[in-house]
Image: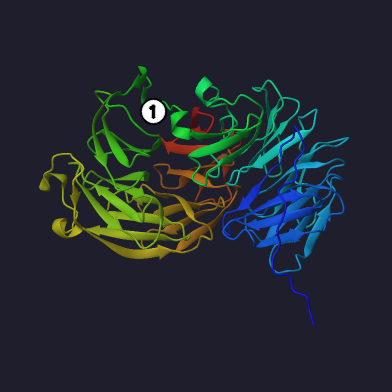
Amino acid sequence: MSIQLVSSFVPSPSTIRGQTTHLYADQKSNRIVFPSGKNIIIRDLDNPSSTIVYSGHSQQTTVASFSPSGYYVASGDIAGNVRIWDTVGEEHILKSTFRPLSGPIRDLQWDSDNQRILAVGEGKEKFGQIFTFDSGNSVGTIDGHSKTINGCSIRQKRPFRAATCSDDFTVVFFQGAPYKFVKSIRDHTSFVNDVKFSPDGAYFIFLYDGVSGDLICQLSDKDSCHKGTIYAVSWSPESDHFMTSSADKTFFYFYLKQHIKYFHNILLYSSSQGPTVVTGKNLKSQVNCLSFNGAGNLLIGTNDDSISVVDVLKSEIIKAIKLGGAPRNMALLKPSNSTIACLSNHTVVLVLETGLIVNFELKGEPTYVAAHPSLSEIAVGYDDNSVKIFEIQGLPLSSNIKGTGNSTDVSIKSTGITLTEKCIVSSHIRSITCLSYSPDGKFLASGDQSGKIYISNSSTGETTIKNFVSHSAMIKALSWFPDSIKLVSGSLDSNVIVWNISKTLDSKVMKLAHPGGVVAVAVVSESEFVSCGSDSVIKKYILA
């Protein structure tokens, strides 16, 4: 004879007057986890009678949080203990246990690698600690607060960031890993109870920029303001709206686009005249990429699935070309003055000089596209770590196809333009983030998410140089010098590096060129190049 548990009817979360009780969910299994007495409860939202009761704590529990994988839960109690245990199976095996604080744990957060846990709350010497979930080794210092930390959040994308909020009226912003203090934000005038990064990592609330920590806007107009203490905030999975809960017994729902106003301006810089603002029809969305075409026009790719064409001499937007997705980057095909754009929906788009477009559907998700300097050939990077080189056949001169300039789709069959795979570069182990052909067309430089840069033969796809590995984060930009020997790179690690393919160990590093990350580099002469970054600064360099 045996006894088998059939079901459990569990209590509601434990609460303390005037204090936030954090609730966390696992979207994969549609379950929530919360503290109740000395237990931790996992409840299935689809089947509320299906519950898990974890009774491993000997003290009153205070918070619990799922790992991003959903396989583990970290839970804390009033004695400062944190237990990490398995959610799979019936035994809920204890993985590890630590005591990061001497007082109650108020909040727990995992990073997206399922490796690090941030624990905050009360203590005598410190109010927070971040550590590895298996060994408990410290991976940074959580400081900057003078009172109890009520909540914390870790950005779930690289570069990693963290934020904590406290009874000392402040929010502290950290960068990692290892995590270190960046700034103390003092925009609040009372106790701060909760802080959350959006799932896409772009923002955290009140609203701040998710990478730099800079204030974007404050949500405090009379129609969207609680009448009592705000205890908690939660983002939607799409990062476009969030909800808040308050002591005034209300929930408020915020739609992000109604509260954030962007200024989508384009400035054309001249060394003799300075900046000129582009006029005409205003851009309606965030700018993703820029490219010049052979006719001297500037093409601007934006998040509203379009390319705007700017007459540089007039500093005026003359038309907009609608695409089937948001362009990630663009490159010029010089033989035909056409532009090739990489979209986010398994597609690359050929935009002819007339404004007519040709769509090419790909097997895989493209991440970047580059054009050969003299041939009708393109290289496409993919999120499966590969680079494929294609020949574009049947590409006519722009004068051979007449168009109105509107966003009219042209089928591949009707134009006779085809895309034929030539070779594959398969050396990378992370998804491709940047590509660039050398000016002589012999080499293709490719960068990936891990910070590695490979140089390959553009005719065969064979990788010839693999030791350009000095960057420690995603490669964001690559640009060759006219001699086809030197190459400049920019990365999210904030550094700019000039490489030499004939002397692979002879590299020049500009450290911390742009705090927060480099987003673009461009060579302008045999000895000059420029860079820009998340710090909104454009810098010009010369090789001496």
Q: Please provide percent x and percent y for residue 458.
A: 38, 58
Q: Please provide percent x and percent y for residue 453.
A: 52, 52
The answer to whether 439 is drawn above or below residue 55 in the figure is above
The answer to whether 256 is drawn above or below residue 351 in the figure is above
As rendered, which of 396 and 72 lies closer to the eye?
72
Q: How many marks can you see? A: 1
Q: Please provide percent x and percent y for residue 221.
A: 52, 21
The answer to whether 87 is drawn above or below residue 241 in the figure is below
Viewer can see residue 528: no
Residue visible at 81% across and 58% down in the picture: 55
Residue kind at label 1, given as amino acid type: His
Q: Secondary structure at mark 1?
A: loop
As rendered, which of 329 and 465 lies closer to the eye?
329
Viewer can see residue 454: yes
Residue visible at 85% across and 37% down in the picture: 123
As rendered, which of 151 and 436 lies closer to the eye?
151
Q: Is 174 left or right of 394, judged from the image as shown?
A: right
Q: Is 352 left or right of 454, judged from the image as shown?
A: left
Q: Is 102 left or right of 491, judged from the image as shown?
A: right
Residue pushed farthest top? Answer: 273
Which residue is label 1 attached to?
264
The answer to whether 281 is drawn above or below residue 177 in the figure is above
As rendered, which of 324 and 439 lies closer to the eye?
324
Q: Please provide percent x and percent y for residue 500.
A: 51, 47
Q: Is 90 left or right of 388, judged from the image as shown?
A: right
Residue visible at 82% across and 58% down in the picture: 56
